[in-house]
Amino acid sequence: MGKAKKFRGLKFKYKVDGINKQLTDKYQTIEEFLEAEFPKNNNPLSPTGDTKIYDVTWNTHKVSINKIVNTLSDLRKVLSVDCYVTNTDIRLEKIKPRELERKSTYSIEQIRELTKEVLFEEDKRNAKVELDGDIIKGNSQRYQTFFTKGIKCVCCGIEGKYFAKEKVYRDKSYHLNLYAVDENGKEVLMTKDHILPKSKGGQDHIDNYQTMCVNCNVAKGNNLED
Ligand SMILES: [Zn+2]
């Protein structure tokens, strides 16, 4: 390959034993990613393992791969193609907020009530709740954060006002996003922030989450998740 291509913000989701995981910007360039050595055996990122991946994004772009890319080793193969940038195997699609398909909005109280029985349910099969005909995952770590840590941004204080039932057009199921509204009437997405960033060893655990609006979260330099 020629000069290193910026690969900042590589993100992909993978599944291990049916559980969704996410890997974020560990690698700054494609080369770094390709040259990384992954231990074999139990490491979920082992290129020889059957790690199923999906939802690959690069910076804020969704990576559409025309070839069938099911596993980490498939991804490495595609990315190692020399003419990566012009290769039609990979297209970059900008993810725009308007690509979110919104069905309806709900009050904070409605969603608190809907999820309260399953909020900390560990078995995802038991954590599904129905909301006007759509099945929603009721134990999302975001809902856990909002309902135990509060719905105000810990930095700027903007407060979540309602939930919207939304999905990315290609997704099958809907989820709920919490929104605040700023002084110009513009919606501001509320996110869950890692208090101690994952890059510094912070855990994926409710104790390490706090509520932050998307603007403050971006300013903090975190990767938004989930
Ligand atoms: Zn904020």
Image (spheres, grey):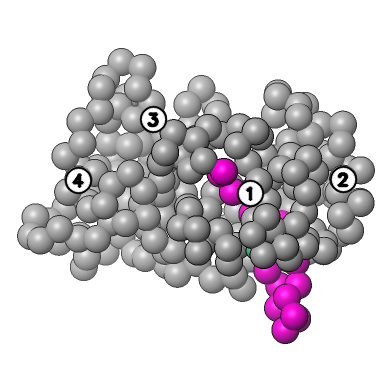
Q: Which residue is mark 2?
A: 112
Please, what is the three-letter code of the amino acid marked with disc 3?
Thr
In three-dimensional space, the C-alpha distance between marks 4 and 3, rounded to whole angstroms, equals 19 Å
Density class for disc 4 (Cα within 10 Å; few <14, some 14-19, many ≥20) is some
Q: Say if 144 sits above or below 10 in the image.
A: above
The reply to whether residue 53 is in sight is: no
Majority secondary structure of magenta residues = strand
Q: Secondary structure at mark 2?
A: helix
Dot 1 surroundings within 10 Å: few (below 14), some, or many (20 or more)?
A: many
Q: Nearer the viewer, mark 1 or mark 4?
A: 1
Residue position for label 1: 192
Residue at left 87%, top 45%? 112
Q: Secondary structure at mark 1?
A: strand
User: What's the residue at 63%, 41% (across, down)?
Assistant: 209
Instruction: Quadrant for residue 159, please give it.
Output: bottom right
Q: Tell me whether circle 3 and circle 2 mark residues in contact (CB < 8 Å).
A: no
**Of the image marks 1 and 2, the number of the one nearer the N terminus:** 2
Foreground residue among 79 and 119: 119
Q: Position of residue 98 (x, y in %)?
A: 61, 73
Please, what secondary structure does the residue beneath circle 4 have?
Answer: helix
